[in-house]
Image: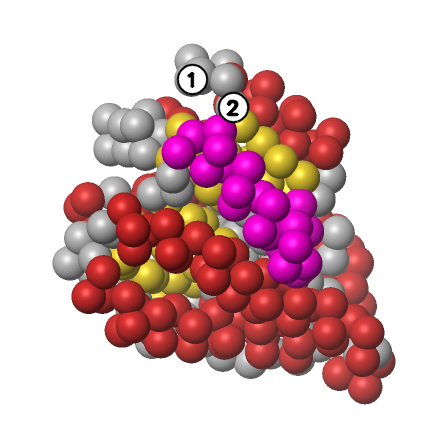
Amino acid sequence: MELNGKVALITGSARGIGKAIALRFAQEGARVVLNDINNENLKEAAREIQKVGREKVVYKKADVSKSKEVEELTQYVVEKLGAIDILVNNAAISRIIPFLDTSERLWDRIMEVNLKGAFLCCKTVIPGMIKKGGGKIINMSSQSGKRGSTWHAAYCVSKFGIIGLTQSLALELAPYKINVNAVCPGVVFTPLWEEQAANHARRRGIDEKQVKEDLVKKIPLGRLGTPEEVANLVLFLASSRSDYMTGQAINLSGGSVLY
């Protein structure tokens, strides 16, 4: 098993890509810690992961944009499981909305969750990794962290920021044997995307039923990605197989982004 006995904290893991990562990690022997802001979704995800035969799954509700809650989350994990070997900063929100319609509050909230959340989680987890003598941090960016797009300014800025954070931390933490990398998925039709389908249709001037077809047109491999495919890449970055890789922002977009 790739992650046997490793403690992995995955934020935003009650559904979508985060849950897929948690399931994959559990299958590979990790002691998974789930986090989200929806307690009912957390309980359901924990029950699902339990079915793969792992020991009792640890989970805790916390808003990653709140420093006190992040500190309490980290302390809870350390008290329960002793240390954190792997951190996956996955929690994120997104809105497809014209720039001039983007309120200051919405802009701030997207930055708070997507970028500040990763900052706070890194800040509280890294000291323990240094003490332990190493660790793995995987930050979820996006193809929107590599190129801008219309009606997506705040999200793009937050995901560009994730790549900057990844590169800076990779250099700073290399002496401590802490690897920091980012994953940049293309379109993966998770609940987050489903919630925005109507706005994407409005942006493109198409019927909502045409959204998936419209998205696929831009993908050279001719299909959308899956949460499981993202989870497989994150597993590689969390495992010893990627020990000589740090500071990278890896595309997983079916050929949509090539740089």
Name the one closer to the observer, 32 or 74. Answer: 74
Bounds of the magenta segment? 62-82
For the residues bearing labels 1 and 2, Cβ distance under 8 angstroms: yes
**Circle 1 residue:** 54
Task: Find residue 23 and report its horizontal and vertical position in percent.
Answer: 46, 30
Image: 237 above or below 15: below
The quarter of the picture where the N terminus appears is top left
Q: Position of residue 90 (x, y in %)?
A: 52, 52
Classified by dominant secondary structure, the portion drawn in magenta counts as: helix
Please name whichever residue, 110 or 84, is drawn nearer the observer in this view of the structure.
84
Q: In percent of the image, x 60 and y 52: which residue is there?
A: 70
Which residue in the protein does label 2 denote?
57
> Dot 1: what SS?
loop
Q: Residue at x 23, y 50 (%)?
A: 133
Mark 1 burial class by Cα count in 10 Å: few <14, some 14-19, many 20+: some
Q: Is residue 142 visible?
A: no
- Disc 1 from disc 2: Cα separation: 7 Å
